[in-house]
Image (cartoon, helix red, strand yellow):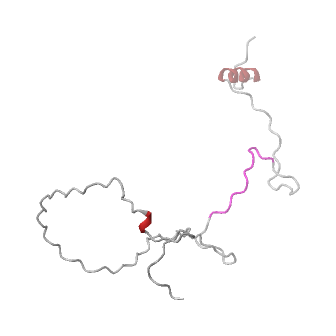
Amino acid sequence: MASSTSGRSSPEAARAHRHLLDVEPPVAEAPQPSIEMPNSMPPVPSMPTLPASPPPPTSLPPKNKPTFTILPKPRPPLLLPKPKPRIPTLPRLPKLPLLPPIPYMPTIPIPKIHSIPTIPSNTIPTSPATGLLISSAPSSN
């Protein structure tokens, strides 16, 4: 099996050469559709389509849309202690000089009374009916 080595290479030699290079033989490509595709056929995406991103912001907002400014939240007012009403005070008296200590004087012992002397009941004028004291002053009727 001698292959001809004339100027043209045979298909077997080309296949052997491709095999040595580990290159797959070219596949006959399907005819490409024309650039103008009908609107009824959507294009077949090779990658999943991403949702449409919003347009990049421009420096000036559109004139027909109202603009809103986000204001920071207001802080509560700082609570200060209420001022206490000033109570008028009397003028201070000048400090007196310290007096010398009073010498210790022992207390005079008071005799303890163990029993209260009783007055004989015949000396107190009482009413025999009620047992109340009879006053010596005349009553004014």
Q: Quadrant of residue 109?
A: bottom left
Q: Of residues 36 and 12, which is closer to you in this image?
A: 36
Q: Quadrant of residue 7?
A: top right
Q: How many marks?
A: 0
Identify whether 130 is placed above or below 3: below
Instruction: Tell me the magenta residue range.
Output: 44-56
Residue 73, above or below 39: below
**Residue 85 image-quadrant placement:** bottom left
Residue 36 in magenta stretch: no
Q: Quadrant of the C terminus?
A: bottom right
| Of 7 and 46, the residue lying toward us | 46
Residue at (44, 79) in percent of width and height: 136
Name of the residue lying farthest toward the bottom: 141
Please identify the dominant SS of the magenta region.
loop
Query: In this image, 44 relative to 109: left or right?
Result: right
Q: Is residue 19 above or below residue 58?
A: above
- In magenta segment, residue 54: yes
